[in-house]
Amino acid sequence: MSRVLVLNCGSSSLKYRLFDVPATGEPLVVATGTVEQIGERVPGAPHDHAEALAAAMSDLPLDGLTAVGHRVVHGGLMFSTPALVDDAVVAAISDLVPLAPLHNPANLAGIEVARALLPGIPQVAVFDTAFHRTLSPAASTYAIDAETAERYGIHRYGFHGTSHAIVSRRTAALLGRPLDEVNTITLHLGNGASACAVEGGRSIATSMGLSPLEGLVMGTRSGDLDPAIIFHLHRVAGMPFAEIDNLLNRRSGLVGLAGVNDMRTLLTRRAAGDRAAALAFDVYCRRIRSYVGAYYAELGRLDAITFTAGVGENAPAVRAAALAGLDRLGIAVDPARNDTPERGARVISPPDAPVAVCVVPTDEEWEIASQTLGVVAGGAA
Ligand code: AMP
């Protein structure tokens, strides 16, 4: 049996999950938890990640721990697979901080603290970007001056890779077909949101780019917009770039349009006749539909569309609206199947529809644990 601790450090939060993984059979979640407000001046809040992690670990049964898996947001061009952490890997993640200034420092803090507290236990970095390293140059290149792009690492890296990976695999399993024969559009709709075209298990297109700002409308992020909006706000509104950064990352998306970032509240307000909520919902769903159309064209043949994460798994209204009117493309949602309170992986399109529309719960923590065990087993071989 193996025991794996998964750590996901955000700028002011720490999420952890401890798994026991038998040689055969289902993994067991031994413990799970979240520490928030790290470093915030709130009574009782931990000062830093070291304090938060030490407190969390003192309550965990860590005897017999096999490995620690860390979620790392940005792996740049360097990491196409998970990496066993050593000083060189730490330095590489540190070099990528300019590309992920909010995320990579927090991920690094988790790695440093876990290395110090658990000496001798293998630590593995699992990157959000790695799954998208299969993008072709045509899919990952921005059409700007090539030399400038090369010098500053301007490239579509893509994110949410662990989620798109596990969800596309589970979609093939749900359909009872080999992964390499199934083409899927995965729609990860959580607080952050991204779409991915997965061809036979390989990511060939994804909506997030250099950073997690691009693509779908999100809880607080704008997703796609005309880059000239940024220059306009700078020139005409006199906004400094830091303020525009904050506007697009934290005060846009659903919260910018309707004042709420939680889809549940948005749906309640929309049902009560709130026009801002209705418009936000329409903008959100329309963007999803545009990506479905684009990725259908990229894939050529589409077998499945899969919704996942908080909104994707729990909001039938979003699923129905995003795919409404696409029957001629073989895409339809069965209202009864869509509205069922069932929670597991399931098909919500009508029987025999050419494209299976699915809902598949994501499990990024388990994907990180399983990739971590893969690295540790590979290293021992
Ligand atoms: P995640 O980032 O995957 O945890 O997703 C979080 C988001 O999922 C929340 O901000 C909500 O907008 C959304 N969500 C969670 N539960 C529901 C629900 N029952 N109905 C609609 N949206 C939900």
Image (spheres, grey):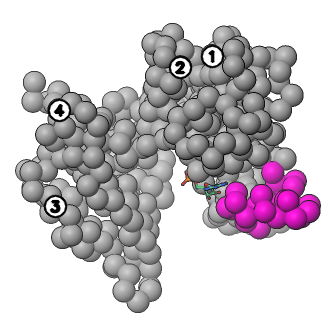
Q: Amino acid at mark 1?
A: Asp
Q: Verify CB contact (< 8 Å) between mark 3 and mark 4.
A: no
Indicate which label's residue lies in the foreground, 2 or 1: 2
Give the residues drawn in magenta, as a range.
Answer: 258-281
Q: Is residue 2 left or right of residue 371?
A: left
Q: Earlier in the sequence, mark 4 or mark 1?
A: 4
Location of mark 3 (residue): 61
Location of mark 1 (residue): 303
| Disc 2 from disc 3: Cα separation | 38 Å
| Disc 4 from disc 1: Cα separation | 33 Å
Residue 293 location (% of width, % of height) = 76, 24
Circle 4 crowding by C-alpha within 10 Å: few under 14, some 14–19, many from 20: few
The reply to whether the residue tagged 1 has its Cβ within 8 angstroms of ligand 1 is: no
Circle 1 crowding by C-alpha within 10 Å: few under 14, some 14–19, many from 20: many
Secondary structure under the numbered disc 1 in the rendered image: loop
Q: Earlier in the sequence, mark 3 or mark 4?
A: 4
